[in-house]
Structures are given as structure tokens and as C-alpha cells.
Image: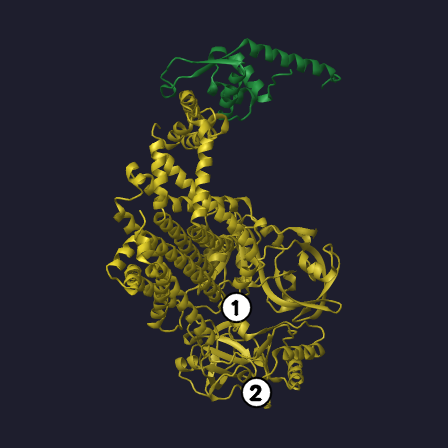
Amino acid sequence: MAKEYLGEFEELVLTLVAALREDAYGAAIAEEIETRMKREVNLSAVHVTLYRLEDKGFLKSSMGGGTNERGGRRKRIYIITNAGLAMLKVMKEARVNLWKLVPQLKMG
Amino acid sequence: MEQSWIIRFLRWFCPPHLLEEIEGDLLQKFERDIKLFGERKAKRRLLCNTLRFFRPGILLRNKFSIEHNRATMYKSYFKIMMRNMLRQKFYSAITMLGLTVGITFALLIGIFIWGELQVNTDLKEIDRLYLMETNYKTDEGNQPPFFVPALLGQAAIEQYPTLFEKYYRFRDRGITVSKDDHHVRLQSMIGDSTFFDMFGFRVLHGDPQNALNKPNTIVITEKIARQFFDRSDVTGESLTVNTEVNGLKEHVITAVIADVQEKNSVTDFMNSDAQVFLPQESRVDFNLGFQDEWNTSIITYLKLTEGTFPGEAAATLNKILQKDAPQDISSDKTIVLNPLSNYYLLTNHGAVQKLIISLSVIVAFILLLAITNFVNISIASSFSRLKEVGVRKVIGGVKRQVLIQFLSESLLLAIVSGTLSLLLYEILHHYFAEVLGVSLPSLLEMDLLFWWYFLMGIVVIGLLAGLYPSFYLSSTGTIESLKGKFNSVRGTLRFSRGLVGFQFLVAVFILVTSVVMSRQISYFMEADLGYDKSQVLIVSSLPRIWTEEGMNKMEIAKREFLTSPRINSVSLSWGSPNFNFEPYKANINHAGQPVEKGILTSMSSADEAYVDVYGLKLLDGKFFFDEGEPFQANRLVLNESAQKVLGIHVGDKLDIQFSDQPFTVAGIVKDFHFESMHEKIKPVAFLHNRDFQAYRYFSFKLNPGSLEQSVQEVEQLWKDIFPNDPFVYAFTDDRLAITYQTELQLRKATTVASVLILIIVLTGVLGLVSLSVAKRNKEIGIRKVLGATVSNILLLISREYAFLMIIAFALSIPVNYFFISQWLSGFAYHMEVSGWMFIVPILALFCITIIMVCAQSFKTAISDPVKSLKHE
């Protein structure tokens, strides 16, 4: 974990790109966060995060095909790279390891 | 959609390679929002979402083609600008001076206006608070408009709880509050227990729910608590209140509230500055009638429920009034609701609002003049920058870059001037506040919004100042600029002359206006008011014992005061001219005729010495009776206006509304101004204090001599005679100044403004002249060689300005005349506008300008033509 580090929001976006597969683009990710996480996000934040993740090499992108929706504008579809997947795994494991240190209380 | 400006804005700043998908995502979200929230909200959201893309994470992804040499470019701009400014110190100083003076003045006035606009904003849910006022169906009523029937507010809440939420009713009284030997005269509000909840005043100690609902309780502000006890936690302590009916009474402090905004329309209603608050139960102590009767007059605030339309509420109030109130109360009035949010600005015929508007106009003019100076001098001195522009263009600079260069220069200058002005403001605001008689906070107390406005103002000033010169410089052709000569000089010359003319126009306008205002204000400060206002001291803090016994007591006090050699005469009365003169108005008529058909007359009370103290002129009869004569009941004195309208004579009998006995006319006094000169003199009737059963002031006519010593002497006597009452006094002159406070403030502001405008305009002209002389150096040389004399040359240069001034003056006179006639017509008594008020300022400005122009060009005019011609 020395070199790269992901913020909470970055991790969320990266995970969603991985989950949405062929349908991962800015507006869809924002919608997904809104419906699944019940959390207000603003579109520009998602975009900026996507660009930053792409800069870091965790994502690749290409323009999708044109449709009649959204005024004919194409989407930029994101795919997670191997580095990105590895990063997610590292983060998840680190979290699981940390979680194990917490004394497990029986809830309820 | 396509043409929406916000999308165009996005296209402008968004990196092209990201544009398509961002636009697409935004549109997708927009369509989704339409389904979820509807079109209007979706549009707002689109705007928000798009604006949020204007952030570094997006902007910095633009590929700047000339990115790395931009910084050096700006550095070079800056360096060149500094060099230029240093080389032309004189012109830089003039432009900076103008801008700084202008912005500083704007700051001072702006912050004053800001403060005035903040009045009442601390009150809770101000947009639902209203003050009830009475509109009398006849021209005028018996009472000031803010008095309404006491039961109305209560009835409204009970009958229409869906429209009205709360009410607070009060009457104010000046009372003496004491603790041991410490006596203070304070303004009080005697009113409902809803006081705290209604306006959201912060309670520091005590329980607001039960603070004002028991007799003999009192609520005070923190300031007063500290004054009496040196601490704020004083609930449970008690203070002595000197009541009018029941003498000294102990009152328990039930709550202490935090100090309230200095100006507001509740505790500072009509500038009363109330600091103590008593429950409705105290009304009996002050002879104020009962709060649950229709015929008691009271001041009422109402809080409407959310969403209630004020028009509907007012209609409902009138319905209740007509239905429930007795005929004699409801028949002559309608009720209106005034929103408290702008009550302060609009009260007193909108005096504050008018002041704000006048001041804003003055500030706008001053700023415009400062900007005009900047534009003029930039244009005139731009020939020195032309070569630079040429070189930049040859090397590859495009028009836009040059434009940006000059715009950023003026912007930078505006910012520097702005910063200087902030410093100047901090230094000057105390002085200025004193001159204007207002309070101006330090900049450190201003909130964020103010800084935004300030920043925006500076940017606008910078752009306005830089726009024309930059366009003009950047659009000069490359070759032309390299040559350092303008081909098309005529257009700019005309523009620049137009600006100078405009400056003269504004200058003369403000000068003349300032002279007229100043004369008018002196006119009514010095005019014959019909009474003698000099050396009269008014003391308002006497105990109000409104009984026969009290009257006797005051009579004895009067005799004791008269033993002092410094006091000429003493009078006990209800009011003094321009200072709470009349308690109410009533109809009077010949005895036996219907009173309703009589004339509405201001009723006041006084004693037989009043005529001496105020130097009123007795036209006929006596002022009640001669001093020393025994009291004779039911006499009254009328002023000339009343006498003329009624056609009455000394000895006739009169009926007075609200009184069941006829009064005999004892005397007629000459008309005097008991109100401000905005108003025509109205009918007045004086009743004797003993018949009136009330009094409020002692007026002392002092003998000539040191005022200070006289005041001290009166105070000493006062302490002997009234040991339980403080000594609160005022001079009639000062009271008169308060009557004309807004006018006096305006006069001071216009005087300051005229001086500033003169400075700005004259320095501007100075700069222009010296530039034009420098440019015409060679021309002057040739003229001299051909035989022109020094005076020919001076004439040549000053002719241009003389011509401009004459046009400007000719244009300004009619506008100005119209404006001041309008302003003067707001006074029932005003001076005549005479020619000299125009001629003197115009001539003065003309002469000063011409002298300055000549002085500036004299050096060139006497210089040896050989020198100027041998160049090149």
C-alpha cells in the first residue's frame, strides 16, 4: 500500500465500474450510487474521480456507440484494469484483516 | 436545450475531448430529473450540476497550447505596467487618487447603507411580522396612525386563528427606575407577555413564559442590568419604578434579555430605545386604560400564519372592526398592515429610503467620475503605449492578448485602489461616523456577503475603467501603432471630450444641489420659527404625578427654581415645539354647535409662563391669565391659524371633542412652527395643565451667561427639589437638529461629495491638460515661431475647456433646476431658488478650471520654441 492509495469515494466508484461492466459510465454510476447507497452525489464529482482513476491506471476507457438517447451524445465506457482489480482486492483484504482485530460483539 | 447558455458555458470551459460524454451524462440526468421532479426543478438542477463541472479537476484537463509561456507573459505584462507607471508618476498618481477616493467614499456610504438595510433583520421570522396602523377616513385623525383599538389584535387571534398567529401590544412610557440612590430615566414598553416569543429576543436569565404576566414584574436588558448591578444574572432582584398613579413601586426582575440590535422597529420604535419592559398589568400604574377595551389606543404587532396573504389579513381585521367595535370607534377608520421588514425604511414618509437613494446616486456619480478620469487619462497617455502594442503584435501577439493585457492592468489598479480604500476606511470610519452622526462598524465586523459585493464592485470598476482604453489600443492597426501615431484620432477625441463634458456636468450638478440643500437647511435652522429657541433647556425626567396634588407640587418646584438668578422663567407643559408637542388632536367648535363640524386641532397643555419661556407673540388677550393671578379653570389659548378658521374672538366659548365642558378663549398667539417645516402650520389649542391633568416637561429660559454653569446650577437645584429623579435634559436647538436629522446628514454627505468631486474632476483636467500640452509641444513651437504670443497660446488651450464647460453647464442647468424644485417642494416652507445659487458655483468652477489650465500650460507657452522644434 505504499505507492497508491484509494479514497473512500474512489474505491466506491472503482467497485461500481467493476460491477457495472459494459454499462459503466458517468451518469449510470452516479445513478447507481444514488439508488443503492441512498446518497446524493454530484455528477461532476463522479467524472473527476473517473478521470483520476484513469490517470492512476486503474481504469481504461473508450467511447461507446451512438444512440438516440441523450441528444445523440456518446458515452464513455469504463473498464477496470488488472491493476484496478488488484487494488480493490488489496484494499478489501486489508480491511478484512483490520476487521478481524475488532473484538466481535454479538449484535442484537 | 441546444441553445441554453449553460451548455454553451460548459462548451467554453470544458476540455474538448471530455465534452461529449459530459454533455451526454448531463442530458441523461436532466431527462431523469424531469421524470422525478418535473421540468422546473430539473432545469434548476441542470444548472447546478453543470456549474459544478467548473472545477479544477475538469478545467486543468484542458490542454493549454501556450501553457508554459503564459506565466512569463503575465510577468512581462506586470513588469511593463510597473515601468510605465513609474515613468508617468504624475498620471498614475492622478488615476489612482481618483479611484481610491471614489472607492473609499463608496465604502463609507455603502457600509452606512448596508447598516440601514440590516435594521430589523434580527427579528424572528420578520417576513410574517406586521404593524397595524390606522387610516383615518378624513384627512387626519385624532391620534398618530400607529395607535389602533386595543381589542382588535386579540379579537383577530381568537376569531381567525388560521390567519393570525400571535400579537404583541404595548404603550411606551418614559419612567424613572431606581435602585437605592441610583436613578435612571428609561424608556419602557408596557405590553403583552408574548414579547419574547413574538420577536425572538434572546433571554439570558429567567423564564420567558412567565416573565411578563404578573403585576409588579419587570424585564430589563443586559445593559441596564450591568448599569444597576454590575452583572447580568439579576433575576429575583428588584428595582423601584416611579409610577404616575401609584407612586414608587417595587418591581421584581423576572428576566434579562440580551441587548437588542441598536436600531429596530420594536424596542426602538420611533427612536424610543426602550430598555425595560413591564407587563400589561402595569397599565393601571400609568393611567393607560385597559388593554381589553375597544376605546383604548395601543400599538399592535401581528404575526400572520405561514402563507397568509397580508391583504386578506387586513381585510379580515377591518371586518372584525366593523362587526365588533362600537360604532364611534369603527366608523372613521380602516386598518392597514405594514410589513415590519421595510417599516424602518418607509416610515416617516420614507425618509430613510429617500436618504439611501440620494446617497446611492451620489456614490454612483463619484465612482463614475473616478472611472471617467481613469479612461480619459489612459486614452490620452496611450500614445506612449502604442509602440509597445505594435511590437507585441509584430512578434505575434493577437488582439485578444493585448486586450487582456490592458484589461488586467486596469483590474490590478482597481484592486490596489480597493485595498488602499479598505485601509483608508479603517482609518476614517470613526471620524466619518461622527460627522454623519451614525455608527459605522469596523471592516472586521462585516460578514462574508459584504466582501463578495465588495470584490464584485472592484471587478466591475476595473473592467469599466479598462474597457474602452483596452479596446481602443488593441484594435489599432499594427503598422499604425508601430509608427506611434493614430490615424483616426477624431473618434477618440470626441469620446474623450464627451467624458470631460460629462464630468463638468456632474460636478456642477452636485455643486449647485449641495449649495441649495445647504441654504435650505440653514433657512429652516435660522428661520423665524415664531418662537425663541435660544437658551431654552428642557428637562423631561420630572416625576409624573398627574393629580391636583402633583400640580401643587410642581407649582412649588417652579417657585424654587425661580430663586436662581440664572433662570429667567420656568414653564411646566406637555411638550415643546418640535419635541412631542401634542398628545392628540381633537375637533373644536363654537359652543353649542356640533363639535364634529369643527376643525381638527392639535391639543397641547402648558401654563401661563409658557409664553415667556418660548417667546411666543400674544396677538390678543392673555396666555390663560397673568402670572401670579389665581388659576381660572376652563380657559384655552388658540394660535392664529385656529382663530382664523373658526373666526373666533377672545372671550368666546368653545366646545372640545372628548370634553363635556365649554372652554373660554383667553388669548390668541401668533403662529409658530411646532412641527418640521415639511408641514404647514396647523391649528393649535393650549389647555392649562390643571385642566388637562397632565404635564411632562419643565422648560427653563436661562438668563444670558455661561450655558455650562447655568446647566450645572439647574442640575444642582433639581437634585435638591427632586432627589428621587434623574436630571435628563436637552436644548431646544438640539431637538430641532434631531427633527431635521436626515436633512442634516444629507447636507454633510453632499458637502463631502462636492469636495471629492472637485478633487477628482480638477485633477482629471490637470492630467488631461498636461498631456495635451505635451502632445502639442511642436505645434506650440511653430505657432510661436510664426509670432504667437504667450496669451494667444494660453487662449488656444483653455478655449477647448471653456467650450466644453459652457455646453456642460447649459445642459445641467434645466435638469438641475427641475431636480431642486422637486426637492424643495417636499417642504411646506422653503426658500426661493435664486440665480446666484447657479451662478456662483458655475463661475467658481469655471474660473478655477481656466486658471488651472493656464497654469499648467504656462510653462510650455513661455518655453523657447527652438527647444521644442529641434527634436527629431
Give the image location of residue B500, x and y in percent: 33, 55
Label 1 residue SS: helix
Closer-to-camera residue (B707/B281): B707
Residue B731 seen anywhere in this rendered image of the structure: yes
| Numbered circle sitting on residue B738 | 1
**In the displayed structure, does residue B622 sit left or right of residue B476?**
right
Vertical position of residue A60 compared to residue B393: above or below: above
Closer-to-camera residue (A24/B316): A24
Which chain does the yellow colour mark? B
* Chain for numbered disc 2: B
Q: Mark 2 points at which residue?
A: B632
**In the displayed structure, does residue B528 sit left or right of residue B718?**
left
Give the image location of residue B111, x and y in percent: 51, 53
Label 2 residue SS: loop
Q: How many labels does the image show?
A: 2
Vertical position of residue B592 compared to residue A15: above or below: below
Mark 1 residue type: Ile
**Could you confirm whether marks 2 and 1 are on the same chain?**
yes
Give the mark nearest the N terminus, 2 or 1: 2
Which chain does the green colour mark? A
**In the displayed structure, does residue B421 sit left or right of residue B504?**
right
Closer-to-camera residue (B493/B833): B493
Mark 2 residue type: Gln
* Chain for numbered disc 1: B
Answer few, some or many: residues within 10 Å of disc 1's Cα (few below 14, many 20 plus, some between 14 and 19). some
| Numbered circle sitting on residue B415 | none
